[in-house]
Image (cartoon, helix red, strand yellow):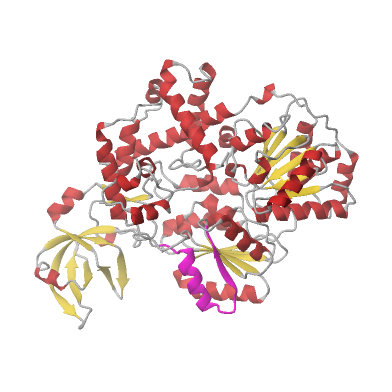
Amino acid sequence: MELTKLKGVGEKTAEHFAKLDLYTTEDLLKHYPRTYDIYNEPVTIKTLEDLDEESAIEGVVCKSPDIFGSGKIKILSAKLKDMDGTIFEVVFFNMPYLKASLKLGARYVFRGKFKIKGNHYCLEQPKIFTLAKYNELKGTMMPIYPLTKGLSNNMMLKCISQVLDINKDYLEPEFIPSWVREKYELAEHNFAIQNIHFPKEFDDYIKARHRLAFEEFFLFILATLSLKSTKESNPNSFHIKRLKEVDELLNDLPFKLTNAQLRTLDEVRSDLTGDRTMSRLIQGDVGSGKTIVATISLLEVALNGYQGAMMVPTEVLAIQHFESLKSLFETNNLDIKVELLVGSMTKKQKEKAYERIESGESQIIVGTHALIQEKLVYKDLALVITDEQHRFGVCQRENFAGKGNRPHILVMSATPIPRTLAIILYGDLDISIIDEMPKGRLPIKNAVVDESYRKNAESFLNREVSKGHQCYVICPMVEESENFEAANVIDYTKNLKTKLPNCKIEYLHGKLKPKEKEEIMRRFSNREIDILVSTTVIEVGVNVPNATVMLIENAEMFGLAGLHQLRGRVGRGDAQSYCIFMTGKKSEKIKKRLDILNKSNDGFEIARKDLELRGPGDFFGVRQSGDFDFGIADVFADSKTLKECADAAKTIYDSDNTLSSKDNIYLKKKVIEYTGKVLEKINL
């Protein structure tokens, strides 16, 4: 049902929802809370652990309130004692009428964030409850949703409540087989949807989240199994030999490959010359040197008389790879024709490229999704390399496989997923890991700082730009949002331009049109922009060796694995590089977590330690592995659930790979729906 059918949702409000990709009531139910406002037992000041967390405190008025100010602003101040006898102050703005309630001896529960003013604790503009009212609320969890400008949390609550009320007489058929639900103690689907939005107690939230995470993984794995072909049944139809020209190029490179690169390259070359079609994943941290392994593999295929294709996420990155390949081959006197194919090319340019590819004149083709368009015909495609696999997926690999003989597949990913989990997520791929960094690179210098360091950070950006370098600034949000305090790209850019007028500053975010994003990244790559303020869309960006500073605002809001990926955008040149993790909260817990990044540059180790710091129910705001497009499941936090899903899915697939049995009727329907949405997202 369309959202405009809901009470209170007109065309304008629907436009705001559309900014969050919410168009139907089904979309809305899958728009899960980012966190919850939990009405905990009131605390005393002595037991406060974190001033930045909202707390409830029971207090008795010990001094009659005073009212200060004149004109438009009236300030009411009252002194209270908590249950341990500690004095604290409450301050209200433009609420003089509260003076009648805050009489000597009156007892209330106040809820807000404490500040230290001088030598005493203070609550500014707290919510105020009678003891009876707070006791009613105690233990409840109020959902807080991801929002955008024009949408309030209250509007989101009302709309989701409406949808749940409309659907109360309609129960979606249970699609996970009963034996799976019993074995893994899964709640029923409709219970999970109700209790992820409005849990009556914390235990209901845990059950709901577990069920929804399980079903996301479960459908993903079954869809993957249904889309792929078993690689053992695919014989190698290409006659590829190891050639001396490739070995000569390796010896003539201006740098020496690491042992991990050489080991991985040997595994790839063995696959290319083996009996079966290669399906291999190369995992390696940002900057570990995956691209040169891909380059050598493409060269080997081309010199054997076949075609190779490399598909990357952005046009700017495609252009960069294209120019890099051409330069390498020309420098080494290798007559290899490299073709670029991207969406922004004119119709005539594309048609000419199609002709050269179909005739075989073009031996190596580099591009974006344009490489899998229906019109494109390859003469003899033997190798396909996809960069950042999680942004393409098994569907595209299968699409490539339909273009003539099934080509060898090589996938590259910088996401630091432990091997055991990677085997599940990339079940049809063998895995190579590049676990060494190239020698000679200066380690990135890191700093975890709070707001008090802001002026220094801005001066530091200015100094680096004056030296001729470039900088990134990462914000968690595109624009200002109600009920969600965090740096946003648009306002941050305006503000920074006034503070650093001599710097060329632009912003980048996912809501810009593709051509706009590509143009901004091209200009940054060409040094036409000094400071790029961006959301995490630059995580898969271009190689900009001149960028030496990465400043990440509200760093506490990101998973450590994501922060590590962002940090990898700098440190790619000869100059010393820096990463500044700016946090808006003075919390020892947050500092301890972010300090992990100070002590390690190993993405796998960082992900493991981050997981250790979190308890079983500590999932609020955690989205480390959003690259896989799961709504609530997290590859790291839910690793145990992922393994359980893999076991269950394999058991079902082995006994009923068409999902045709009576027990799997609804499951088959769900898998088909899920697969269809994946295909639709990539416009196939």
Residue, x 29% and y 46% (percent of image)? 6
Whether residue 218 is visible: no
Residue, x 68% and y 53% (percent of image)? 345
Image vertical order of residue 189 relative to residue 665, above or below:
below
Left or right of residue 616, residue 261 in this image? right
- Tell me the magenta residue range: 486-509
Whole-percent x, y for residue 665 in the image: 42, 21
Left or right of residue 578, residue 328 in this image? right
Whether residue 391 is visible: yes
Considering the image in quadrants, where does the N terminus appear?
top left
The number of numbered discs placed on residues in the rendered structure image is: 0
198 is within the stretch colored magenta: no
The quadrant in which residue 97 appears is: bottom left
Left or right of residue 56, residue 19 in this image? right
Left or right of residue 661, residue 575 in this image? right
- Foreground: 207 or 344? 344
Whole-percent x, y for residue 71 in the image: 21, 83
- Foreground: 577 or 541? 541
508 is within the stretch colored magenta: yes
Whole-percent x, y for residue 161 in the image: 27, 44
